[in-house]
Image (cartoon, rainbow, N blue to C red):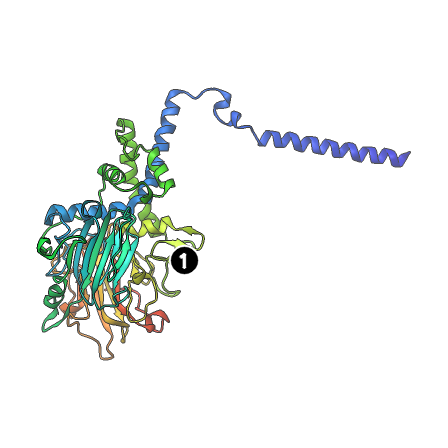
Amino acid sequence: MKMINKQSIIAAALVCAVTAATALAQETMTPLVKQMFNGAWPDKATIDQLNHERLYQRGIEAYMLTLPILNTIGMKDGSEAQFGKGYNVLPIWKDRMTAKAWVPTPNCDVIYSMNYLDLKETGPLVVYAPANVIGMFTDFWQNTLTDVGAIGPDRARGGLYLLLPPDYTGHVPGGYYAVKSATYNVFLFFRTVMTPGPNGPDPKGAVANAETTRIYPLDTLDKDRKPMQFPNGSAARANMMYPTDFSYWEKLKAFVDYEPVASIPPEVRGILASIGIIKGQPFAPDAAAKAALTKAVETAPKMIFAQRLAGRADKKEMYYTDRQYFNAWAGVDSEWFRPSYMDVDQRATFFQVAYSSSPGMVMGNINQGSKYPSTLRDADGDLLEGSKSYKLHLPAGIPAKLFWAVTIYNPADGSMPETGQAFPSRNQMDKVPTNADGSVDLFFSPTKADGVNEQNWIQTLKGRAFLVTIRLYGSGTEFYDQTWKPDDVVKVK
């Protein structure tokens, strides 16, 4: 009997414990109806505030997802406003690109040729690419259709490329490097390399080479083709940046209406629809919606910038374990894919300050590809500040088969700072004095320090942030196996 009583007591205790635990769970696992407004209706002010917040947050996401498109549209609109529109109009920065051109991280140490081709308007286009071009064609998402040059199918010999619109179903003739674009709009981006001159880089040969480019519709005869125009972009003050106000959404709506539905992933179309951007339907936000979307386009860039400054938790963006230099692609491929997802955050951080992502920039093509180790920080981990003085030491044997260059940029958008110097850059052909062992020392400061050669100095702006990018064209094995590394930027007095 005593044993039975003890078991009964234990059983009763267990029942009580379970009952108490269940009661506790019921208290902590409150039904949704109790969490939201205690089961009552929310008032109108609360409803309006939540819907405004939803629209604002969707605007943030829409901005981050579509920045690659608006990055290209900004360049197209700025170029066409300054130099004219047409497949036969190819602006060339014949005297190199200067800070007068507002473009994300341009390279002022090569000759740029850029055009924006509309295959909906023209049908298939033929492009003759000159030999030894470093270039690419991309759709307006900046997905590479093909590299051009040493990494492309022409292998630096030059050749005829055939650009096909997304809905093309006709015959594809032989003899061309044919590619089909997902968007009607295609970006042509060619770079030609200067040669050493008596006082620095000589652009004449690179310009002459770029001017052999030819662009014409596939079905035109020689006698009917428009003559090419090559306006010189170097003297122009051209704003080719993406919009930073409500016009961002208006330009995006025009793109959505013009391009095929399939050119935009369905989930992105869904997010755009949630903020009122739907193909073929009016985009007419009321005052509250316009305010939310304006706030989104003002806040999203700051969020992306903050993400860049914070860095990645996994450190995949760092080139080295013992240096401050980062890789803007952070280990993804040129279309921002990781093994199991697309890295939309890393893509947004790239297109805030840069454009044109191609396999030739990402893959380890020895003596042919290009690499861009960049830094926002000095050796102490402090952000670079234009009022201070710094030195960058590049050890001897810089692994760049074509040439090397060092350029500074405004870190918020990648534009070049406009200083008293012609270019915020120094390159291999600038007759930069070297040390006895062949190494190079470059100095960054608002005024040139005594004892520093003019050719070793890049001017900064007082009170302004800056970032440093090292370009290695034709990067060699020493870069990939890290037997050669650039020193960190260091403060100097």
**In the rendered image, which residue does mark 1 sit on?**
315
Q: Position of residue 259 (x, y in %)?
A: 26, 42
As drawn, 229 above or below 453: above
Coordinates of residue 354 in the picture (x, y in percent): 26, 53
The residue shown at (37%, 32%) is 54
Who's the residue at 70% across and 33% down the image? 18
Can you tell which quarter of the image residue 274 is in? top left
Whether residue 389 is visible to the viewer of this picture, yes or no, is yes
> 391 and 193: which one is in front?
193
Instruction: Tell me the crowding category of disc 1: few under 14, some 14 to 19, or many 20 or more residues within 10 angstroms, Cα based.
Output: few
Q: Residue furthest bottom?
A: 436
- Quarter occupied by residue 216: bottom left
The three-letter code of the residue at mark 1 reads: Lys
Evaluate whether residue 241 shows in this view.
no
Quadrant of image for the C terminus: bottom left
Residue 237 percent across, percent down from the top left: 11, 50
Q: Quadrant of the N terminus?
A: top right
Q: Is residue 103 left or right of residue 320?
A: left
Left or right of 98 on screen, residue 147: right
Seen from the viewer's position, the closer of residues 474 and 1 is: 474
Residue 398 at x, y percent in the picture: 27, 73
Q: Residue furthest front?
A: 171
Q: Nearer the viewer, residue 385 or 135?
A: 135
**Residue found at x 27% / y 29%:** 285
